[in-house]
């Protein structure tokens, strides 16, 4: 069915490079119009950086585009094909409720995918309705923008519109569409799909496209596909280390949810850890803890091994040599991850230089935190400002001994106490998207139509390292409960 084109000048400057790849990779698919779209939140700074006129985006014509009722003139809507290992099992997937409008070329020359999530059925929907509920779309908006403010690579959220329609999940819920912005939607699962359904030349085509889009500076004298593998591994090592450093738990680290660009993607049952515990799981479907907080680095390495397998025909003509090259590259992940994690942990403790005992010092603190069920974010915030009176942890002999060792370690470096304090301020956020605060915001928005709670939360999260008095309300841990907090995929 044809969708009406929008001719209003909003600032769209779309290209469609992915649509010029082989038809195996995607299917032309238009959004399904909705009956009564209404804009509920718009990301003004992101709109400006994309070169879009925020005022016009709020007009009827702008909302028509954000809801899929119209498409920009240069748009070429497609649903992308991909596969994925879901909880370890290979499955053919694809964009079952998302449509890529095109790639916005910004005033600075950057390229970003513009995708409508919840925009209707596609050929990959299987038994799904292609729609999304308001709560999960607002949740992705809140968390993805919080991650951006924390300095963690992520897809972004441009807008959420309600559709005026009800969708059926466990109960009737208001429908919504999220406009997602990403460096690309290339996934490990994209490569798995092409490896399964296509030829070696198709894999080469996809790899060449990925290199050109995300890694254009590779040395032509080297094997470009080994370079691609190593660069993807480097980006994932940085990303997962940053997740761990702020206590972020993705919740469903399937290979289709690992972006080649190194961005965090697909915010389903994600959440942030309050009490420090390596076994923390929030997702209602992760019954065995596969994607628990402490397992995330191992799962990342497992996913990268699946990516490496798809590139084997390109790495070397001799299969055994190709396998060895892939294994060597993937094994480097843990070295790269540990370097990034230790670097971040040293910053959280105000340490500028490296000493051999640092890892033991860090692990000892985390062990004490886990034993006394300490709040992860607030422990490091208290250390930052040397305010140690509010937690049980700080009144223990174990902590007193650790604290003495830490202070002695700080004295051994040349930098001043003021410099260490500033380093810690920049590494330890004052607040994170606390699960109970996110739920408060979603409940007010979905059940009462009150978006002010969410807007206040988003404003506080926009500068997490400010450590301002206004942020104190959002940094309070939840009241102890006998029922564990659970998140859901929101599909």
Image (cartoon, rainbow, N blue to C red):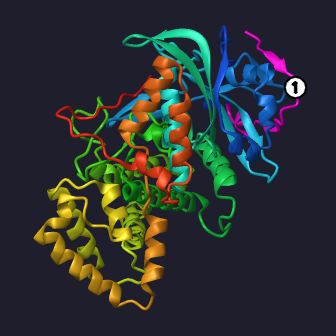
The residue closer to the viewer here, 440 or 289, is: 440
- Packing grade of label 1 (10 A; few <14, some 14-19, many >=20) is some
Q: Pick the quarter of the image with the C terminus.
A: top left
The residue closer to the viewer here, 431 or 12, is: 431
Say which residue label 1 marks.
Answer: 8
Return the x and y of residue 49 as percentages of the image width and height: 74, 47
Q: Is residue 200 left or right of residue 75?
A: left
- Whether residue 477 appears in magenta in the rendering, the answer is no
* Residue 316 visible: no
Q: Pick the quarter of the image with the N terminus.
A: top right
The residue closer to the viewer here, 431 or 252, is: 431
Farthest residue toward the front?
469
Q: Is residue 158 left or right of residue 287?
A: right
**Vertical side of 71 occupied by 241: above or below:** below
Which residue is found at the position 49% from the left and 62% from the top?
234
In magenta, the rendered stretch is 1-22
Instruction: Determine which quarter of the picture holds residue 115.
Output: top right
Which residue is found at the position 32% from the left and 67% from the top?
387
**Vertical side of 104 occupied by 81: above or below:** above
Q: Label 1's element?
A: loop
- Whether residue 17 appears in magenta in the rendering, the answer is yes
* Residue 87 visible: yes
Return the x and y of residue 230 as percentages of the image width and height: 51, 62
Which residue is found at the position 21% from the left and 40% from the top?
480
Q: Is residue 391 left or right of residue 172?
A: left
Return the x and y of residue 109 as percentages of the image width and height: 79, 52
The residue closer to the viewer here, 124 or 106, is: 106
């Amino acid at each position: 069915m044809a969708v009406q084109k929008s001719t209003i000048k909003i600032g769209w400057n779309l290209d469609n490079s992915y649509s010029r790849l082989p038809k195996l990779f995607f299917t032309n698919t238009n959004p399904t119009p909705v009956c009564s779209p209404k804009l509920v939140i718009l990301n003004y700074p992101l709109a400006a950086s994309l070169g879009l006129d925020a005022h016009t985006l709020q007009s009827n014509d702008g909302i028509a585009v954000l809801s899929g009722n119209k498409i920009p003139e240069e748009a070429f809507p497609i649903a992308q094909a991909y596969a994925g290992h879901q909880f370890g099992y290979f499955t053919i997937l694809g964009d079952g409720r998302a449509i890529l409008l095109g790639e916005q070329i910004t005033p600075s020359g950057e390229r970003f995918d513009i995708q409508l999530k919840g925009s209707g059925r596609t050929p990959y929907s299987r038994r799904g309705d292609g729609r999304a509920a308001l709560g999960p779309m607002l949740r992705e908006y809140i968390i993805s923008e919080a991650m951006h403010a924390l300095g963690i690579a992520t897809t972004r959220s441009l807008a959420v519109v309600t559709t005026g329609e009800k969708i059926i999940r466990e109960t009737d819920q208001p429908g919504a569409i999220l406009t997602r912005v990403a460096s690309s939607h290339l996934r490990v699962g994209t490569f798995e799909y092409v490896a399964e359904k296509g030829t070696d030349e198709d894999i080469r085509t996809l790899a060449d496209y990925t290199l050109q889009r995300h890694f254009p500076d590779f040395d032509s004298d080297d094997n470009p596909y080994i370079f691609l593998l190593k660069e993807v591994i480097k980006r994932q090592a940085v990303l997962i280390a940053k997740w761990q450093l702020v206590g972020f738990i993705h919740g469903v680290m399937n290979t289709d949810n690992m972006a080649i660009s190194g961005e965090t993607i697909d915010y389903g049952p994600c959440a942030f850890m309050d009490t420090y515990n390596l076994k923390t799981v929030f997702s209602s479907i992760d019954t065995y803890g596969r994607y628990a907080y402490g397992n995330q680095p191992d799962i990342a390495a497992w996913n990268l091994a699946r990516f490496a397998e798809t590139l084997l025909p390109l790495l070397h003509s001799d299969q055994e040599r190709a396998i060895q090259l892939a294994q060597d590259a993937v094994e480097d992940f843990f070295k790269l991850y540990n370097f990034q994690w230790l670097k971040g942990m040293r910053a959280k403790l105000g340490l500028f230089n490296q000493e051999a005992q640092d890892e033991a010092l860090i692990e000892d603190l985390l062990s004490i935190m886990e034993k006394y069920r300490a709040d992860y974010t607030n422990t490091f915030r208290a250390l930052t400002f040397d305010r140690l009176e509010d937690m049980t942890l700080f009144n223990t002999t174990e902590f007193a001994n650790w604290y003495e060792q830490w202070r002695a370690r700080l004295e051994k470096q040349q930098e001043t106490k003021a410099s260490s304090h500033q380093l810690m301020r920049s590494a330890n956020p004052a607040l994170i998207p606390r699960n109970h605060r996110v739920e408060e915001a979603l409940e007010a928005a979905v059940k009462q139509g009150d978006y002010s709670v969410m807007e206040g939360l988003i404003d506080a999260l926009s500068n997490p390292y400010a450590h301002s008095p206004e942020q104190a309300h959002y940094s309070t841990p939840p009241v102890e409960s006998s029922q564990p907090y659970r998140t859901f995929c929101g599909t």
